[in-house]
Amino acid sequence: MRILILGGSGFIGPHQVRYALARGHQVTLFNRGRQAEEWPGRVEELIGDRNGDLKALAGREWDVCIDNPTTLPVWVRDVGRVLAGKVKQYIFISTISVYDKNDKPADETAALAPYAGKDAMAETSDTLKANMGLYGPLKTLSEREAANQFGQAVTVIRPGLIVGPGDETDRFSYWPVRLANDGKRWGDTILAPGPGSDPVQFIDARDLAEWIIRMAEARTFGTFNATGPAAPLTMRHMLEGIAASLGAHAHMIWAPTAFLEAEKVQAWSDMPVWIPGQGETAGFHRRDIGRALKAGLTYRPLKTTAADTLAWFRQQTPERQAKLRSGLTPARETALLEKLAHKKG
Ligand SMILES: NC(=O)c1ccc[n+]([C@@H]2O[C@H](COP(=O)([O-])OP(=O)(O)OC[C@H]3O[C@@H](n4cnc5c(N)ncnc54)[C@H](OP(=O)(O)O)[C@@H]3O)[C@@H](O)[C@H]2O)c1
């Protein structure tokens, strides 16, 4: 196949490129050219800008276009004006943040987040950055614009938290790094969130990327939640699984949700991956993935994701490794553990 990847040099893009090349496809990338990559094969690299410069795409045809970085409906509209009728399939990478509510387990038919602004087509990367609450609503409208532009030829992929080698947010990496505890930066006791039984869902970027290429090969259309693993996983099993895969010592203290809330420890950012499994967020990590499983989504074992993520992190510069972008600092974790012990004692 001739595959056009819009935004192929970010986090998930390079995994798509490598898998597509390995399966014998012809790959073209389109981005601003800010990050050079060494590809293991011939890749055509087109330079342009989703904000108004799509000249490099004009007059060309591909079997499939995968649109990775888009959150703005105007980006979908503009690319549709150039590519509609020129590609047989348009795969839009959306997000599970499109859902309006997270209070119960739900499938792809759940209600989507409404947009309350004045003009969605006037939203820009800057207006989004200034108000990240627009992320879900603008992804929702981008999905809709994909249908306006490409009709039935659309595949919408809604990933949950994407993790693994190359993740610059550390929203999963914190745990393998914390559990491995290189250089003994943290203490021996690990603060873990909630009762341990809260569910967690996430997807290895490579599982996602490879499945997207197979969705193109199979020309599968429709809308799919894309998170994992296949069988339900709890926070406790995730942490124990990561620890076991690294051969790490894991003496965990499980901090009650109410304690964490009172201490303003934020779920997701301070305690990565974790979202309380009750109340308004009871369904967040219980998204139905039956459709994706039927369409061939497969998963690496957790131990592979954990080990590879840690190996990737250890290759980063010392400055990058010194300051994680998610999770608790060693000092904050120690202070919280002391408070918790005092409370219990
Ligand atoms: N990370 C998660 O946990 C998560 C969860 C759910 C859904 N998602 C979705 O997954 C998708 C993939 O994200 P990602 O992290 O791989 O990529 P990304 O950071 O969203 O995009 C990076 C890619 O897009 C290109 N790009 C950015 N701005 C551009 C512009 N103005 N014009 C042309 N190209 C541009 C970049 O290259 P240049 O800089 O060279 O232009 C790069 O190739 C996103 O749609 C995100 O919303 C992510």
Image: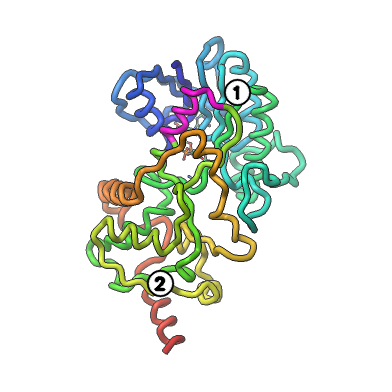
Q: Residue at x 58, y 33 (%)?
A: 156
Neighbor class of circle 1 (other Cα within 10 Å; few <14, some 14-19, many 20+) is many
Left or right of 104, for residue 250: left
Q: CA distance from mark 1 to mark 2?
A: 46 Å
Q: Residue 48 in the image: x percent, y percent? A: 50, 23
| 214 inside magenta stretch | yes
Tell me if 45 is positioned left or right of 145 in this view.
Answer: left
Q: Residue at x 44, y 28 (%)?
A: 213
Specify the label residue 332 is tagged with: 2
Disc 1 marks a residue whose amino acid type is: Val
Residue tagged 1:
79
Label 1 residue SS: helix
Numbered-mark total: 2
Q: Which residues are magenta?
A: 209-220
In-front residue for pair 12/300: 300
Type of amino acid at the residue the image marks with label 2? Arg
Name the one closer to the observer, 183 or 63: 63
Name the spot of residue 154 as percent of width and height, x first.
60, 26
